[in-house]
Amino acid sequence: MKRIAEISVILLVALTSYFAGSFYRWLFGIMAIYAIITISWNLMKTIGRLSMGHALLFGLPAYISAMGYQYSVEASIYLFPITIILSGILFFVFSKITGKTAFVFLTFIASIMLWILTPKIVIEKDGILVGGEVGFNFFNVHFHGIFILSVISLIVIYLFTAEITSSRFGYFMKAVGDDETASKAVGINVDRVKLITIMYSSVLAGFAGLLYALDFGHISYEVFSVETSIFPFVASLLSGGNLFLSVLSSFFLVLLKRSLNSVYPGLMDVFYALVLVFSPKIGGFVYVKGKKFIKKL
């Protein structure tokens, strides 16, 4: 019953967006994409790894795929899964060579480096240089198609992830997140749990990036922006770590961004800054109140 109620809420938001008009149908696609990023981020959080570089997992597979698309559709298709796998392996290596705190900074630095370097990447297509700050054209799906894809994808991903986190493997994930040494002592294969979790997280983030590129028919260095990396952290913070509430908080943040930036461009960045400054207090308050609210459901 709980899962049915949660999916009903997501469908209600989707249907409301659909009947509200074309703009809101398109906007729900963006909301769903960012909700998938947040779900992906929460998976790493469960194993004790806070990623501040999720923009890399989100943007790099679609970006490399778009580069391949300049030459052929086949190249684009091949490059996408390969880049997802390599991105996941990179984050797994980061988790092996660093502690929890260093992982935050290393992932952040990696995504920032991409944000700085990708505007300098250009390739030749039919004798013309493409890329750079402009980015690359990509296959475009009409917003009606993106709406349907985003609704189905978000529901399937949410249900599958919720089942994983509440399963025996989910228990292992939480144990690893709490204490890796103790987990090893009771026979949990920590590296296996981390690898599977990070790879699944990478697949979700990469898929969200693909939806984003298909929605706009274009991708540029902006997918690696600091805002993209901060977004899932803020959404998770506002939800108290609850998976379903993190989906709703992602919806809320996308709507808030549209509202604030329509008043004054860049106002959303001020909001993010305030949340980051007061994050310990906000997190504690939301966690306590959230637990009481969830118990009442």
Image: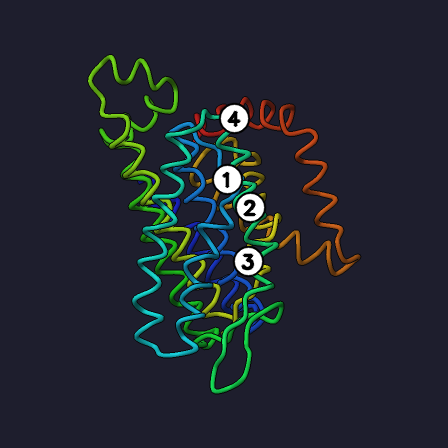
Kind of element beneath mark 2: helix
Sequence order check: which comes first, mark 2 or mark 3? 3
Q: Are marks 2 and 1 in contact (CB under 8 Å)?
A: yes
Dot 2 corresponds to which residue? 229
Quadrant for residue 84, please give it.
bottom left
- Counting from the top left corner in percent of width and height, residue 104 is at 52, 33
Q: Nearer the viewer, mark 3 or mark 1?
A: 1
Residue at horizontal 43%, vertical 38%? 42
Kind of element beneath mark 4: helix
Dot 4 corresponds to which residue? 101
- Counting from the top left corner in percent of width and height, residue 137 is at 50, 76
Residue at horizontal 48%, vertical 82%? 125
* Residue 153 falls left or right of residue 21: left
Instruction: Classify mark 1: residues with Cα within 10 Å, few (<14), some (14-19) or many (20+).
Output: many
Q: Amino acid at mark 1?
A: Thr
Judging depth in this view, the residue of 92 and 51 nearest the camera is 92
Quadrant holding the N terminus:
top left
Q: Amino acid at mark 2?
A: Ser
Q: Report, in whole angstroms, how far the alpha carbon at label 4 lies from the one at label 3.
A: 24 Å
Sequence order check: which comes first, mark 4 or mark 2? 4
